Image (spheres, grey):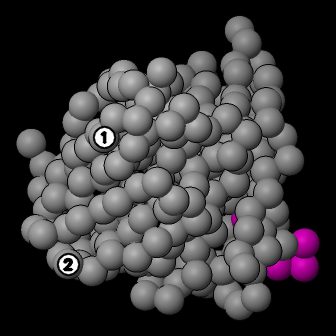
Amino acid sequence: DAGITQSPRYKITETGRQVTLMCHQTWSHSYMFWYRQDLGHGLRLIYYSAAADITDKGEVPDGYVVSRSKTENFPLTLESATRSQTSVYFCASNTGAEAFFGQGTRLTVV
Amino acid sequence: AQSVTQPDIHITVSEGASLELRCNYSYGATPYLFWYVQSPGQGLQLLLKYFSGDTLVQGIKGFEAEIKRSQSSFNLRKPSVHWSDAAEYFCAVGSGANFGNEKLTFGTGTRLTIIP
């Protein structure tokens, strides 16, 4: 199926553990983004990528790492998870006129 | 820096009534403006966008929005809401640096509840 998929949909992890959230798109859009959604804050940009091997920080990048070795994949890694990183994470890709969002990953850090 | 304000956290509307969700933006140049809708447990779906031209833009599901530059507003409207419109609505502004491939700045969202 064409689209943008995130995995896992739900994840519980312990403080201090490394966790990777996956994002895959089938369109070959150049731009991809990672947002986190928290009550009272809306969506905030963590990292974005303009193309394979090109990434840049967004508004709230601390504690996160991204890579993009292939155009279609844009994984987000929490190097050492903290409770403040409990959130819903959305991946998106952009056609140039519209952003398409995945269904989100709900991450709980205990 | 660009910013978006959605002053209403939660709005309740009767089914069949009209709707207006408020959005105020701050941006130095011509803004690229968007409205997205998020149903529970889902990602965001684009309702409509403004890049240039007519101040009134039409979107999907019967929604429209009007940009008023003098007020820096981009309010979302619908003449008659349906129970299926219950969702979270986000206004967003983009810089337009690459005609849409820009980073979007989102408002904090407005939750819409529909009562019978």
Give the percent coordinates (x, y) of residue A43.
Answer: 57, 50
> Where is residue B74 shown, x and y percent of the image?
75, 63
Foreground tag (1 vs 2): 1
Quarter of the image for residue B65 reads bottom right
Chain letter for mark 2, please. A
Q: Give the crowd class for mark 2: few <14, some 14-19, many >=20 residues within 10 Å.
A: few
Work out whether B98 lies above or below A55.
below
- Which chain letter goes with mark 1? A
Q: Is B83 above or below relative to B87?
A: above
- Seen as rendered, the residue at the extreme top is B116
Could you classify mark 1 by the number of other residues whose Cα lies within 10 Å: few (under 14), some (14-19), or many (20 or more)?
A: few
Q: Residue at x 79, y 30 (%)?
A: B10
Please give left or right for residue B101 compared with residue A1 in the image: right
For residue B70: magenta? yes
Q: What secondary structure is marked by label 1? A: loop
Residue A99 appears left or right of A38: left
Amino acid type of the residue that numbered disc 1 sits on in the rendered structure: Gln
Which residue is at a point 46% across and 72% down the rendered structure image? A57
The magenta span reads: B66-71
C-beta proximity under 8 Å, tags 1 and 2: no
Mark 1 or 2, nearer chain start: 1
Q: Is residue B73 visible?
A: yes
Q: Choose top left, top right, bottom left or bottom right for residue B32.
A: bottom right
Residue tagged 2:
A53
Task: Say if B84 sits above or below B92 in the image.
Answer: above
The residue positioned 40% from the left and 35% from the top of the image is A16
Asked if residue B1 lies in the magenta stretch, the reply is no
**In this figure, which residue is indicated by the disc labeled 1?**
A18
Q: Quadrant of the N terminus of chain B?
A: bottom right
B43 or A63, which is in the foreground? A63
Residue B68 shows in the view: no
